[in-house]
């Protein structure tokens, strides 16, 4: 929609250019379908702010263990410091609510949401920079920025509903806007304990925090970029594919660690990528000029297509063991580059000489062939079997420790079975 036919805001002139309502000459109100995209973006923004409020305190004991070196020595003070990661939201609200409301009243919804989303994103990336036991002050600084972002969320649902929705939808839109905040709290309770293991090993905790913080920063960045406007949608659709792919890759890795189902995870993700390709083809062919549908399908396609990468590498490493993982991944990457080059040049020729539909059908056929070939691969998990054998062998080894020269005692490590005559680990150890 161009600026000339932009709808007029019923509430504020500064929101007029981006408003979802148009007052007709007969007094009726016309609403635009993209109002649901705006509401979805705000809900996503609200989810991330609420999530960042609670996601560290729900694993407070793990945070204390990880940041112990940069926390006060007293246990009570340590707990209080971690409590302030959420309490800071309440403290920051008081001095910032007035300037936030002034910004909303003077500049409108668009600027308000962009500023809030920017602060939320900056806070998330600052928490990525806080990965390190000695960096609790950096973590708190990032949480302060996220708390400032929350101020730009809490009063928005009624205003957004009034600007973008008709009289018979205002209450529904307001409810949905508020609902996003509750979803964020629920996600904040659910996700962190799954991603960050309650391990005594600081390295393990750091690995979990890395996944959680990078994932949060990626999602908040995507939401911020989507809020910058509707121009150059092609580039933003590409960005959506990439960012959704990051999330897909992380989720696929977590799923493989839990299930070890390399083949059927590969087949499933491959098949869902085919579904995304078919949906994208249908949207283009049927000329469904609905930008939110395109973003949705692009995100779906990116989530599974890019998410396939770690799965494919791990599956290849399993079935080619004892060959090096570097060898299998190198072969896969080289073949992907070669096939990508051929398909790019080939599809350009097909689009120019036949049609875009023909190019998309060809790509769908190639993906379908990949699904079939992957399903035919025998799930011979050689690397996993070798690791299992090593663990079982170690579990049946007994170390006998020789006593000092003036003692007749022998000490045997408990819980280990008697080794066989061919074991090479029965050499006495001197205390």
Image (spheres, rainbow, N blue to C red):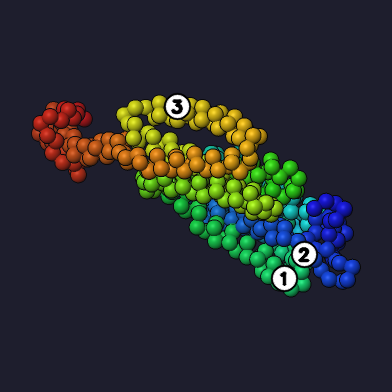
Q: Is residue 272 shown to the viewer in this render?
A: yes
Q: Residues within 10 Å of mark 1 (few under 14, many from 20)?
A: few
Judged from the image, the secondary structure of the residue bearing numbered disc 3 is: helix
Q: How far apart in space, not on screen, are marks 3 and 1 (Cα)?
A: 55 Å
Between label 1 and label 2, give the one nearer the viewer.
2
Residue drawn at the location 31% of the way across and 29% of the way down: 322
Q: Residues within 10 Å of mark 3 (few under 14, many from 20)?
A: few
Q: Are marks 3 and 1 in contact (CB under 8 Å)?
A: no
Residue drawn at the location 35% of the way across and 41% of the way down: 376
First in sequence, mark 1 or 2: give its number. 2
Judged from the image, the secondary structure of the residue bearing numbered disc 1 is: loop
Instruction: State the residue in front, 41 or 414.
Output: 41
Looking at the picture, how far across and down is residue 185, in whole percent?
A: 57, 60
First in sequence, mark 3 or 2: give its number. 2
402 above or below 77? above
Q: Residues within 10 Å of mark 2 (few under 14, many from 20)?
A: some
First in sequence, mark 3 or 1: give its number. 1
Judged from the image, the secondary structure of the residue bearing numbered disc 2 is: strand
Residue drawn at the location 59% of the way across and 41% of the way down: 358
Q: Are marks 1 and 2 in contact (CB under 8 Å)?
A: yes
120 above or below 173? above
Looking at the picture, how far across and down is residue 225, in whole percent?
A: 69, 45
Please give left or right for residue 192 compared with residue 325 in the image. Answer: right
* Residue farthest along the bottom direction in this orientation: 168
Residue at the spot of label 2: 31
Looking at the picture, how far across and down is residue 334, in whole percent?
A: 48, 26
Residue at the spot of label 3: 330
Q: How far apart in space, not on screen, are marks 1 and 2 (Cα)?
A: 10 Å
50 above or below 260? below
For residue 169, the mark is 1
């Amino acid at each position: 929609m161009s600026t000339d036919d932009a709808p007029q805001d019923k509430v504020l002139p500064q929101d007029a250019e981006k408003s979802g309502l148009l007052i007709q000459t007969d007094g009726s109100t016309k609403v635009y379908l993209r109002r649901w995209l705006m509401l979805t973006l705000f809900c996503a923004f609200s989810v991330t702010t609420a999530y960042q409020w609670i996601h560290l305190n729900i694993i407070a004991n793990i945070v204390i263990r990880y940041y112990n070196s940069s926390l006060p020595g007293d246990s009570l003070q340590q707990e209080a410091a971690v409590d302030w990661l959420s309490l800071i939201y309440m403290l920051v609200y008081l001095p910032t609510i007035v300037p936030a409301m002034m910004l909303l009243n003077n500049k409108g919804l668009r600027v308000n949401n962009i500023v809030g989303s920017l602060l939320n994103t900056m806070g998330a990336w600052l928490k990525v920079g806080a990965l390190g036991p000695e960096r609790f002050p950096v973590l708190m600084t990032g949480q302060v920025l996220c708390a400032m972002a929350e101020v730009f969320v809490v009063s928005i649902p009624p205003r957004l509903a009034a600007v973008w929705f008709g009289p018979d939808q205002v209450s529904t839109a307001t409810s949905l806007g508020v609902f996003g905040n509750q979803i964020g709290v629920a996600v904040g309770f659910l996700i962190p304990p799954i991603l960050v293991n309650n391990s005594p090993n600081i390295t393990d905790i750091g690995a979990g925090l890395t996944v959680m913080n990078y994932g949060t920063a990626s999602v908040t960045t995507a939401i911020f970029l989507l809020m910058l406007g509707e121009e150059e949608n092609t580039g933003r659709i590409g960005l959506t594919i990439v960012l959704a792919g990051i999330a897909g890759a992380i989720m696929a890795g977590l799923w493989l660690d839990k299930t070890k189902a390399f083949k059927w995870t590969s087949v499933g993700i491959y098949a869902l990528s085919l579904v995304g390709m078919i949906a994208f083809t249908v949207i283009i062919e049927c000329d469904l000029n609905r930008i939110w549908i395109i973003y949705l399908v692009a995100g779906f396609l990116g989530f599974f297509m890019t998410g396939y990468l770690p799965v494919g590498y791990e599956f290849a490493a399993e079935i080619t063991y004892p060959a090096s993982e570097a060898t299998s991944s190198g072969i896969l990457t080289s073949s992907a580059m070669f096939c990508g080059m051929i398909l790019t040049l080939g599809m350009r020729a097909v689009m120019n000489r036949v049609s875009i539909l023909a190019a998309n059908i060809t790509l769908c056929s190639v993906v379908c062939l990949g699904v079939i070939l992957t399903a035919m691969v025998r799930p011979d998990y050689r690397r996993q079997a070798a690791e299992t054998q090593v663990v079982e062998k170690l579990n049946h080894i007994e170390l006998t420790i020789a006593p000092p020269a003036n003692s007749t005692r022998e000490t045997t490590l408990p819980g280990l079975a008697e080794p066989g005559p061919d074991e090479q680990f029965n050499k006495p150890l001197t205390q």
